[in-house]
Image (cartoon, rainbow, N blue to C red):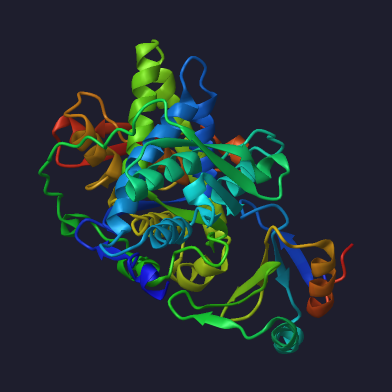
Amino acid sequence: MGNIVERFALQYDWTKHRRVIAGREVILHCHHYNSRLQHTVESAAGIDGKGIMRSSAASVFAEHVANALQSGDDETTKWSVAARLYAHLGFGDLDMREAASGRVEARSSHFVEGWNAGFAGRREPVCTMTEGFLAGANKAITGKDVEFRETACIMSGAERCTFEARAAETPIAPVARQPFAFTPKSADQYPKPKNIDGDAIVKALVGMPIHGGADGLIPAFGVYLANTPADFYNLVCIRFVEEMTARGLGKNAVRLLVSDAETCAMNTFRGIMSSPEWDGLVAPMIKDAPDKLYGIVAVSNALGWGNWYVTSHDPSEALRIESVNGYEALGFREMRSESLHPQCFMLRGVAAGIMALVYGSGTVAERFGSYASVENDCVCAGKHSCSFEVRRA
Amino acid sequence: MQGVPYREKVIACERGGTFKYFLAADRVASVWAALELSYGALVKNDAFATIEIATDAFIVRSTVLRNPLTVFRKRACTEADIVELHRLLEYVDD
């Protein structure tokens, strides 16, 4: 088992600001964002949101688990690898001992923590991504298509989450990608903040062991983090917007995704800013309010989202920020093609959210919408970077 | 000005019930010693300049300055765990 964890050693690509675990780019987001995104996708009327979450996870994790397997692994070891990968990524603790016979249990769940924090009182099972993970793992391990359904959930009051296999209605689709050559702009072209040492913050975060503990969860920075494959986020968001657009609701879908990110930015970074880790590493560099914003940007540049830089900032009024390597834009280019419309909904919402957090007042609900953000340029439209403009609403 | 020790609720934490506990300066060393005696050795994170003690019930984390202490409750945390923690922190709930 000791060797299994070595398979998940973090590779950090300093040029692209990407976190890679078991050969796949992963993105750090917290339980607030993950549960909120899931809530948005699964709550939309007229589309099969659960199906989008589940099948996207199955496609992505069939590849991810396969990447982590090695020749010579027997089937028991393969299920252990899948469970350890799931825990290492921060999604929880899976008991795979009966997986081969179609039953898996979990004692902890990143998604249960997220729903409890944001949508307490929900009684229905919430671990849809785990259903897809298990189907993908099964595909990687046995080569067979099955589906898993959560038949009991901690969110509903059960002691453990329980997943049971059943015959698949459709085979798991591979993740379709097309090569997209892209050279990001150099970070040297952007002004550096005078008080915040962004490189030191990124270096500290990259060196931090951000992986699941004994319970498969990652309590850090005052939130629960998870390393989620970028492909999963991109597939879910792209498919959500496409399906909503087919029903004439594309703009609503975009607005929802931007809102989720704005709310997430306020919740997540407020948690981060009140954490001992922030107090120990970032707070000593802060001299004024704009430094808080620069500190947040530096922290976000270690999360695997890519890297972005403030190009101009009028404190409390406006922000221009440029992303040279955002996972949403590059993912869209790989999974679809060029687009006339910007596709970085998460970064757009976060840009507004961090302004509201740093310069707003009151509760998250009261700050929400106090700044408006637009994406003026996007790599998806053939530009060399994605640029965002935020103004007080 | 509140007397010490006192606590402030931390928003947007892992789950509800996360607080920062502010100790009297002259009690910091003895409180951490008591925590170590009850819960085990503290672990230092040099990159972030933080220290912590983790148990099945909660994580007690602070900067290396040791005050204030942030307590993150885990799912297994019970009221009895908090009562015992408050005793060690010398915190009296109001």
Q: Does A287 sit above or below residue A93? A: below
- In-image side of A273 versus A312 (left or right): right
- In-image side of A307 versus A338 (left or right): right
To which quarter of the image does residue A119 belong? top right
Residue A387 visible to an observer of this rendering: yes
Residue A69, position as x, y percentages in the image: 31, 59
Residue A221, position as x, y percentages in the image: 53, 62
Q: Which residue appears at 26% of the width and 37% of the height?
A: A175
Q: Does A31 sit above or below residue B75? A: above
Q: Which residue appears at 15% of the width and 36% of the height?
A: A178
Residue A297, position as x, y percentages in the image: 38, 54
- In-image side of A89 versus A389 (left or right): right
Q: Which residue appears at 41% of the width and 14% of the height?
A: A249
Q: Which residue appears at 67% of the width and 61% of the height?
A: B74
Q: Does A381 sit above or below residue B85? A: above
Residue A264, position as x, y percentages in the image: 50, 43
Q: Does B57 sit above or below residue A369? A: below
Residue A358 visible to an observer of this rendering: no
